[in-house]
Amino acid sequence: MAKIAERIERVRDTVSSACERVGRDTTEVKLVVVTKSVTIEAIKKIVRLGFVNLGENRVQQLRKVSAQVAEFLQKVDDESSLPKKVNWHMIGHLQRNKVRHVLPIVSLIHSVDTLRLAEEINASAAKLNLSPKVLLQVNTSNEPQKYGVPVGAAAHLAEQIVTLPNLKLVGLMTMAPLTHNKDVVRACFVRTRELFVEMKGEKIVSPEFTELSMGMSSDYEIAVEEGATILRIGSAIFAG
């Protein structure tokens, strides 16, 4: 517990310093703790430390771990400081045939990158009487192995998604390349922020379009400097 708490404190300090450098308020930045490959005991520690935004990138793991956490929160009645529930984020690639399994669990889907996936979410949400929040994943790194809509097609796809009545497009998500070249990483985040601003300026999106999910354990400091509102942090917390 102590080590996890120390690492989280380190992440918070880094976020705080980055915010200070660019004149942002730390309250503008939300930390999603990525629980991929982590034991349920470690996740319980995170929840006990007050973190209620948790992320998973595989549907099967999401279903399993979310059930375990829900059971934990139900059973523990001697810790009044514990939250009643946590918010799950689907941060990985989502196949259309898995959508119905995810919708009842998650508060935000970060990885919508095709109209067909958005339409599937819309149709499943209607059947379940839900209005899920989603982010449009943009491939600003132009890496062929990465998911995400190409930058040039992003605005048009956003226009199509906002016409779907049973979901809410609330922002963009991107992943920078795994590289030590900070200029390359920063360029990806800058382009995503520019796209975000363009979409808002051209009124393609609604006023609910407020989130920029970018930045992981290796590059979240740069992401904060470039306007990220959601960070997806795993190994910096669990692996030191």
Image (spheres, helix red, strand yellow):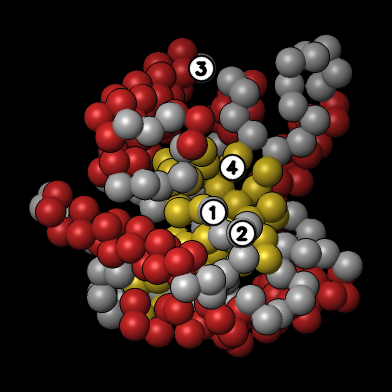
Q: Are marks 1 and 2 in contact (CB under 8 Å)?
A: yes
State which tag comes first along the sequence, 3 or 2.
Answer: 3
Q: Which residue is mark 1?
A: 210
Point out the frontmost of discs 4 and 2. 2
Q: Which residue is mark 2?
A: 207
Viewer-proximal residue among 146 and 76: 146
> Mark 2, residues whose alpha carbon is within 10 Å: few (<14), some, or many (≥20)?
few
- In the rendered view, does 16 fall on the left or right side of 49? left
Viewer-proximal residue among 156 and 46: 156
- In the rendered view, does 64 fall on the left or right side of 202? right
Q: Which residue is mark 3?
A: 1
Q: Which mark is residue 123?
A: none
Q: Whole-Å distance between the Cαs marked 3 and 2?
A: 40 Å
- The residue positioned 28% from the left and 80% from the top of the image is 144
Q: Amino acid at mark 4?
A: Leu
Q: Amino acid at mark 3?
A: Met
User: SS at mark 4?
Assistant: strand
User: In the displayed structure, would residue 132 be above or below residue 180?
Assistant: below
Q: Which residue is mark 4?
A: 54
Placement of the C terminus among the 4 image quadrants:
top left
> Mark 1, residues whose alpha carbon is within 10 Å: few (<14), some, or many (≥20)?
some
In the rendered image, residue 120, in percent from the top left (x then y), is placed at 70, 81
Point out the frontmost of discs 1 and 3. 1
Q: Amino acid at mark 2?
A: Pro
Point out the frontmost of discs 1 and 2. 2
State which tag comes first along the sequence, 4 or 2.
Answer: 4
> Mark 4, residues whose alpha carbon is within 10 Å: few (<14), some, or many (≥20)?
many
Q: Whole-Å distance between the Cαs marked 1 and 3?
A: 33 Å
